[in-house]
Image (tube, coloured by chain):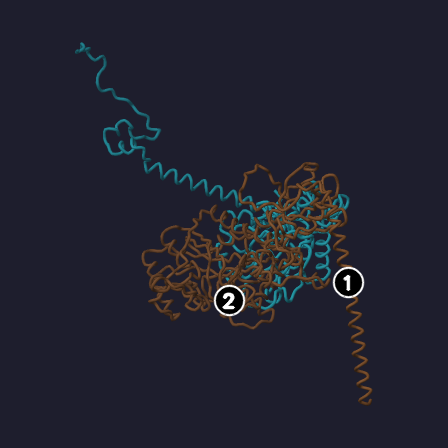
Amino acid sequence: MTKDEVQGASEEEQQAQSKKALKKQQKEAEKAAKKAEKQAKLAAEQQSTEEDDFAKDRYGVSAMVQSQQKLDRVLVRVQDLTPEKADQLIWLRARVHTSRAKGKQCFLVLRQQQFNVQALVAVGDRASKQMVKFAANITKDSIQDVELHIERIFVISQAEPRLPLQLEDAVRPDGEGEEEGRATVNQDTKLDNRVIDLRTTTSQAIFRLQSGVCQLFRDTLTKKGFVEIQTPKIISAASEGGANVFTVSYFKTSAYLAQSPQLYKQMCICADFDKVFCVGPVFRAEDSNTHRHLTEFVGLDIELAFNYHYHEVIDSITDTMVQIFKGLRDNFQTEIQTVNKQFPSEPFKFLEPTLRLEYTEAVAMLREAGVEMGDEDDLSTPNEKLLGRLVKEKYDTDFYVLDKYPLAVRPFYTMPDPNNPKYSNSYDMFMRGEEILSGAQRIHDAQLLTERAIHHQIDLEKIKAYIDSFRYGAPPHGGGGIGLERVCMLYLGLHNVRQTSMFPRDPKRLTP
Amino acid sequence: MSMYQVKPICGGDIKIDLPTCMYKLPNIHAQQGNSCTSEHALQNGEVDPAVKALEARQDEIMRKLYELKAAVEGLAKTVTTPDADLDLTVSSSLSSQSVSSTTFKGTTDLDTLLGKDLGALRDIVINANPAQPPLTLLVLHSLLCQRYQVLSTVHVHSSVANVPPQLLSCLGPRHANSYARHMFQLGFTLIWKDVPKLEMKFSVQNMCPIQGEANVARFLFKLLAPYPSDPALATLVDSWVDTAFFQLAEGSTKERAAVLRALNSALGRNPWLAGPEFSLADVACYCCVLQSGSASSAPANVQRWLKSCENLGHFGPAKLLLQ
């Protein structure tokens, strides 16, 4: 092409462009004109419809409830809406889960904790078109067998129009989301917006079940004659090991947050309380970012004195656990089914009395399955899971006790086996192949305790107070502690302990 | 106030001729004046040591009499029961439990049957439905306990709401050493569970589960004694076991009556079902006859055979459960 031609082409282009620009301008002008027309029309319409609004006082945004009046009005709960209440006029307060308008009708789904009900606002002699429009525009989440026909509708507390996550997405099971291309919500997003995530039916069910576990724990132990104690959480010396403690500044010195109530439980036994339990937070500064570790969790701890054999302690603890499982099985089926809808899992199975295997049997079972391990080796996490599967296959139980651990892998205060110095009077309890409790008969003799501490190369000065508490006559005792969140997670078959912790704390998360 | 005196009518000393044909007793009244200590003893309520010795001798004689009576009864039972050297029901009540392995002849080796010993308890797990308790297995369990050191435990699975107490104690009282599992040769774990069919699990890696009470009974019996080496006899045992579990336990009344007649004719020829020796066939048939409730209406030979089975003393747990 010659320069002239090029110039010509570009000129043409320019001309074309300017033509295009003209056209564009024209189009925009047309659009603007149309818009103005529409707006005028709308304005005209609105004016006309406003005149016809006879239901004006039966809907709207309520003034903020600042305790202006004390009404004796009874608000019916959504779960109590049964066919028997048909044709009654009731007041109800719930969240707007979804709203869908279609012409003269608007369908709303009203949600209250785990329960939903469908409601209908239809243009008729009770409701006007404006009321239907208002109902359709209520932002979501603002304040069953049965359907409600709405006569009056007021917004008590408005929500912002854009929610950070949609509740249906939060409740959708992961598999379904992938299949149908619908959204599911990431765990981190859920945890960042915990207040909204906790409104889902699944979360409500999980935490009601957790409350049940705590309640059953307290009730069972109180019936057995245990006393509930509260132990201090700000302590002067690390109880389990030096590395995993949080330090707090304590006036002019520093103190630690308790890793476990172990020391104080034992002191209560030496103080003749015989059987104690305590429910309280436990702080572990472990930099483990796993599915089952938290830096702060609720510990349910038991300690009791026994007469002749530490199996009395095991029997007491396993009986408590079995009573908890039975209570959950019999009274919380609705909650378990709700959780199963989003997180399907096998129901939890157990034996009564609880199955107790010895460590040698476990090693034999693992060796039979092809694992190579020494007699005194500790069980690694994958081996624990494999053992859980083997036990499940043979005995069909998700909960069992492993007794007589090797002495070398247990802490210094564990009582050695009287007949075989390689083993100890200690035990672990497993749920679905994961460890939930580590316990033992504690050494109650100051002399033996000192020897064992020296053997483990522990600085005696640091644990002087601990050893001193056994110098004035201590009964033989033992116990153990479970983590509430971990037990709930394993009972329901969930995969991450953060789902069962209301506001979880881990090395990367400090809020909400 | 003093009274007037009368002169004595007869003399003070009268001589009485006492007869000498009877034995003489010391004068009781004279004794009172002599020894005050024994008077004190009697008045305090203590028993005279002579009386005590007499009572002891009497007790001893009575005890010996009872023992003699029991021994004679035992002998009587032995005479009517074929193949019993000693009446186990009576002897066990008199003396402490003695391990009698004379019931079954033939040697068995746990290692060949159950696989290499891995240094830990070998636990046999049986899942049974509490609606149909397996009597045969309870009987075999008590036989196993006589032969080996067995750790027996009973569990209730979470699929079952609750279980009557006699099913919880059907394996007998807890062994004193049950806290130390490694001290036992064999474990017998019975789990009451909502299963459609009874099943047994032993080694998850090497063995598939065994289903059905008859098959589990055959497995457990092999731990006690081998099957008869004669194949015809072994087949006979097997066929009786099957008859027991299929026709007696689950059959209609007509089938059961037919089986009872077959039992009658078989027992007319031999003391036990499979010939001269007690075998698994007898265990199985006895339990099924008892469970089907036709024990009282059975023909004569069968009744005699039922009594002989009971005299062997192994069927105690089964009878207890049916009560």
Q: CA distance from mark 1 to mark 2?
A: 56 Å
The 10 Å Cα crowd at callout 1, few under 14, some 14 to 19, many 20 or more, is few
Residues flagged by tags 1 and 2 on a common chain: yes
**Residue type, mark 2 in image:** Pro
Query: Is residue B301 visible in the rendered structure shown here?
Result: no
Say which colour chain A has. Answer: brown
Disc 2 secondary structure class: loop
Q: Could you say where residue A328 lies in the image, as x and y percent from the top left? A: 58, 50
**Residue type, mark 1 in image:** Lys
Q: B131 or A395: which is nearer to us?
A: A395
Residue A511 lies, with reference to residue A210, above or below; the image says below
Q: B206 or A42: which is nearer to us?
A: A42
Query: Is residue A288 visible in the rendered structure shown here?
Result: yes
> Which of pointers 1 and 2 lies earlier in the amino acid sequence?
1
* Residue extending furthest toward the top: B4
Of the 4 image quadrants, the one containing the N terminus of chain A is bottom right
Residue in the image at 34% along x and 58% along y: A469
Which label was assigned to residue A507? 2
Chain identity of mark 1 = A
Residue in the image at 55% along x and 53% along y: A210
| Chain identifier for the cyan-coloured part of the image | B
The residue to which callout 1 is attached is A31
Q: Could you say where residue A468 lies in the image, as x and y percent from the top left? A: 33, 60
Q: Is residue B286 left or right of residue A455?
A: right
* Residue extending furthest toward the bottom: A2
Q: Could you say where residue A225 lies in the image, as x and y percent from the top left? A: 45, 47
Residue A505 lies, with reference to residue A97, above or below; the image says below
Q: B60 or B257: which is nearer to us?
A: B257
Residue A135 lies, with reference to residue A29, above or below; the image says above
How many numbered circles are shown? 2
